[in-house]
Image (cartoon, grey):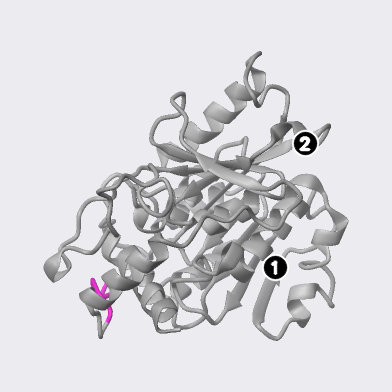
Amino acid sequence: MKVKSAVSQAIASLCLAAAPGVFAADAPALPPGFNPAEIRAAMEAFNKVPDTVGTGKYPALKEEVASLPDHVIYRPADLEKLGKDELGVLAWGNGGCSPDGAGGRLHLAEIASHGYLAIASGRILSGPGAPPNAGPVMPAPGGAIPPPATKAASLTEAIDWALKENARPGSPYFGRINPRWIAVSGWSCGGLQALKIAADSRVHAVVIHSSGIFNAGANPIPGLDIDKSALAKLHTPVIYILGGPTDIAYANGEDDFKRIEHLPVMVANLDVGHAGTFMQPNGGLEASVAVSWLDWQLKGDAQAAKRFTGPDCGLCKDPRWRIERKNFGAGVGK
């Protein structure tokens, strides 16, 4: 349990250290009680955790491919088993806008196992398949902040590549992707990348984890120019999955929810803090909710919709979650 706690602290620290000021102007670079030695040990332990294949009917794998450099792909391992089923596409922004496309590997493999092509920015820099000399990415001494290592445009590159592969004879994805089943998602700083790309007309679902756009003021993140005006450009239902009041993104995520008036929006709070459930088996509860949202919004799955719709929605009745909804009426979902 101590290792899990330290890992959670490490992830929250790394996300915050990579993008200070995103969630609060006076947010510290590192949280009180930060113990580099303990966190390094915890991260090294997590690096040894095997990859998982997810709980869906299509066991997943992760890989890098030459035709899409600086991205990590999560997909059903045996594409032939899809039969006539089509794949959805999820473009993912990493916590801290990190270059480690394997940082959310348990979460993304879970999504892929349910019939999705999930594509994260970066390379495999942690866990199985990482280079031998790769170690846990740690905040610099004194909380010095490097520029974000990935850009929002990487999510667009992922979508572009997937759609080209769908149309390319000879591609393993040829004819297997539904061009309308496109989603963006991300965690922390990566959630801001997803919100920036969500204006793309090809996007039909948005899932934001522990993130929200900062209030008026100078943007402290080089290369990530986004402010609250981006919310007006959203054109598809969106869910914010936050970690409760102790989540450093809580205030900004809740503020985004309050400002969105022109489309269906939900905020789902689970009291786990900023680190979420990404390091739990198969991505934990957050991955489960993300899959259901994607299945409902993209695939029109009526069973998945029951977790979000109606006065007795599944999440509404689950005491672990606190739910707020707006504009949920006829026509929500596909």
Q: Horizontal placement of 47 versus 39: left or right?
A: right
Q: Name the element at disc 1.
A: strand
In the image, is residue 242 above or below residue 120? below
Circle 2: element type: helix
Q: In this picture, is 4 found above or below 327?
A: below
Query: Residue type at mark 1?
Result: Lys
**Answer yes or no: do the residues labelled 1 and 2 have beta carbons within 8 Å?**
no
Whole-percent x, y for residue 49 in the image: 46, 62
Is residue 221 covered in magenta? no
Image position, residue 6 (x, y; %): 36, 78
What residue sits right under mark 1 in the picture?
326
Q: Residue at x 46, y 78 (%)?
A: 273
Q: Is residue 58 visible?
A: yes
Residue 198 is situated, as x and y percent measured from the top left of the image, at 54, 45
Q: Which residues are magenta?
A: 24-31
Q: Main secondary structure of the magenta part?
A: loop
Going by the numbered disc 2, the residue's amino acid type is Lys
Q: Quadrant of residue 228?
A: bottom left
